[in-house]
Amino acid sequence: MTSPLTLPKGFPAYRGSVQAQYPALEAMRGMVLEPESHARKADLQSPSAAPDSGPPRITVLIPAHNEAATIAQTIRSLRRQTIPVASITVMCDNCTDDTAEIAEALGVNVMMTMRNTARKAGALNQALAYVLPTLGADDLVLTMDADSALSPRWLELASRTLQLDPKVGAVCGAFIGEPGAGIIGQLQRNEYFRYARIIQRRWQALVLSGTGTLFRVGVLQRVARERGVSLPGIPGQYYSHASITEDDEMTLAVKTLGWKCLTVAQCETTTEVMPTVKALWTQRMRWQKGTLGDLHAYGLTKMTFSYWLRQAGLYGGFAVSFACLFILITALVIWPQFSLWWTGGVLSITLIERTWTVRRAGWRGMLLAALIVPEQLYSLWQGWLFFAAAMASLQRREIAWGHLAREVAA
């Protein structure tokens, strides 16, 4: 069972009239939050400060917008953890479905956001403004999506990693795709399995994934304090409202302040896959444009250099892929005998590599990889998307968030 959360007066734990329930939220007009005054200076300024003795409390925050179809499985995955959590709070952000009712029926805290226009970042900031004053600087906060489910030992392994190394500020896991959505879904699952292999070998987290990240409270407090000083953003905000990829921006913030961000290999999160090409395009456009916007906000620094380099590599890689495809087609027309021999060798190597790296996806994933053509077309589609996102970023064009509406299972 989830233990009750001790909250300051005015915390919006129940649904109903905003004005009646949230008197303390009136101070949050404009969504500019003040840093916690109770935090000790040493906790906020030193990434290497030693943690207090005793096990930390883990507080879970789940922002949700119309997630009635998935919120139950998300909460149940937390209840199946090998270590208990102190509390679970679902932040219902402008919900028009039964997300709040389902969460309440499962015995967790429910918070209704107030006049939030900053989507997920705004919902998290409202909750953090009330929850963090009740916690110690060495307690832990898990933020996760309402459409994701954690593997049973996720919290145990992630919290142990934070306890063993005080220089680690946050820990996330690899995410894998849920079943379904046909070929479009399988392409995403294969992609996620390959990405998981990369980040699990490196341990260093490229992005503190919104599907699930465990933070030190002291790190979140420091981020809020440094907004507008050493970090972009408005003083007092934890997550930046200016970013459309709040998890990516938070990663840059935590690393800029000197903490390490790690990925634990056995911490896996099952998350949704987009069921259509249109939905996938909208999701990935937001991810890529948001990444470029975050890097622009932080500029070129020692910390961001590898991120800029990776972006250059991605764009360069897609450009080379397009060029190689053009050369191959041309060669097949001009010199077909040599081209077929050369193509056969390249395809053999590609076949082995592509199928082996998705073996966890089962026979469907391996078969799709063995066909080669679908994944190559998917790669070319991604290249087109990346350049479209770059143009949208240069033109400062707004793009859709792309919330996926799902039916509640009977």
Image (tube, rainbow, N blue to C red):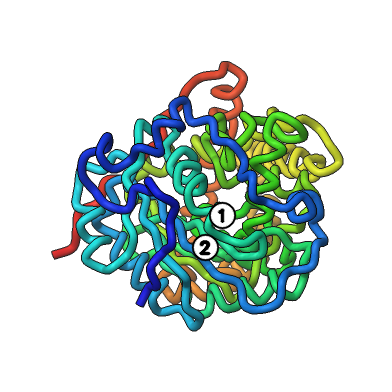
Q: Position of residue 151 (x, y in %)?
A: 47, 75
Which of the numbered marks, if any, corresponds to residue 209?
1
Q: Position of residue 376 (x, y in %)?
A: 54, 50
Q: Is residue 327 above or below residue 199?
A: above
User: Mark 2 = which residue?
Assistant: 175
Mark nearer the N terminus (1 vs 2):
2
Q: Position of residue 228 (x, y in %)?
A: 70, 29
Q: Quadrant of the C terminus?
A: bottom left
Determine whether, in the image, residue 142 is placed left or right of residue 405: right
Q: Position of residue 4 (x, y in %)?
A: 38, 68
Q: Residue at x 30, y 60 (%)?
A: 70
Q: Is residue 88 above or below residue 332?
A: below
Determine whether, in the image, residue 296 is placed left or right of residue 186: right
Judging depth in this view, the residue of 75 and 73 nearest the camera is: 75
| Marks 1 and 2 close (CB-CB < 8 Å) | yes
Q: Quadrant of the N terminus?
A: bottom left
Judging depth in this view, the residue of 369 and 273 nearest the camera is: 273
Q: Is residue 49 above or below residue 291?
A: below
Q: Quadrant of residue 120?
A: top left
Furthest residue toward top: 395
* Amino acid type shown at disc 2: Phe
* Amino acid type shown at disc 1: Ser
Where disc 1 sits, the SS reads: loop
